[in-house]
Amino acid sequence: MRSSNPVFSRRGFSRSGGNAGFDTGQQPQAGNPYANNPYANNPYAQQQTQAVGQPYGAPPAAPPQTGRMTMDDVVARTGMTVGLVVVMATVAWIIDLALPLAIGAGLVAMVLALVQAFRRKAMPALILTYAALEGLFLGAISNFVDSYIAEGAAMQAVLGTMAVFTAVLVMYKTRIIRVTRRFYAFAMAAAIGFVLLMMVNLLFAVFGGGDGLGFRSGTMGVIFGIVGILIGALFLALDFKQVEDGISYGAPREESWLAAFGLTLTLVWIYLEFLRLIAILQGND
């Protein structure tokens, strides 16, 4: 599974090892303006001709097939995973779950996410368990920040996450955002650099005390919070592209679980960055 998420690697829809939508092995053919279509080698693609009037570079629409992924499948699975995160977060908030238990749940959720990330097949039970544990972690952390650091931060972070999701979806559907190989490379480079800097900062904090290099507080914390949200937005676009390609090429229905898993990971990332950014801004007031 290739990486297309700022936190964990996830498999694209290309089983040949390439990322969905970025295989470029097909050679151009004279007289065929679509022969350079970078999606032509997708293993789910059917033998079809480009429809008249279809945008250049767009994957040909696969005919409806039984057992193939649809938008309804993706919406339903994403609703289940994100809904479970919200429900368990509410439970953790109401019962005032202790932070040590919440952090433990978060660590287990991270392990489960990594296990799913490196498997070639979706495991719905594992994905739902991840969502439940992640929800407990988010609920307890949000309750702590809202109660002791920045009142109202959780709701502001939810609204911010919804705003980013809606904005990216609109820009993606209107093709203001176009996911290309260059876009993918930029997003991955930004994410890898961001995560590495955060790991270095954590090491300095553990062995040197304080806030390490200061990437998680003050002015630098604000800057890195904004950067983290922007990276999350980039990966939302990659998630939308992954869903679009999977549907266009008739990916198996179980792939909708992987799409839901990826969207959930990205939304959790954006929410946490918003929560931390709001905590820094209000904490400095």
Image: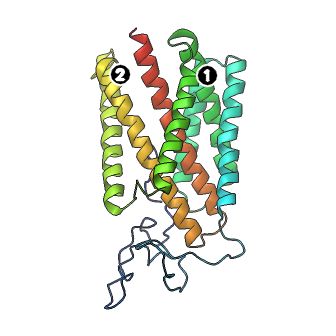
Which residue is labeled 2 in the image?
206
* Position of residue 146 measured from the top left corner of the image (x, y, whole percent): 56, 15
Residue 231 picture quarter: top left
Tell me, yes or no, if residue 9 can be seen here.
Answer: no
Q: In the rendered view of the protein, which quadrant contains the C terminus?
A: top left
| Label 2: how many Cα within 10 Å (few below 14, some 14–19, many 20+) | few
**Tag 2: amino acid:** Val
Outermost residue toward the bottom?
30
Answer left or right for 214 relative to 86: left
Using the image, determine if residue 124 lies above or below residue 107: below
* Position of residue 259 measured from the top left corner of the image (x, y, whole percent): 58, 55
**Tag 1: amino acid:** Ala
- The first of marks 1 and 2 along the sequence is 1
Q: Which mark is residue 140?
A: 1
As measured in the structure, the alpha-carbon distance from the residue carrying label 1 to the one carrying label 2 is 23 Å
* Position of residue 258 measured from the top left corner of the image (x, y, whole percent): 59, 56
Q: In terms of secondary structure, where does tag 1 sit? A: helix
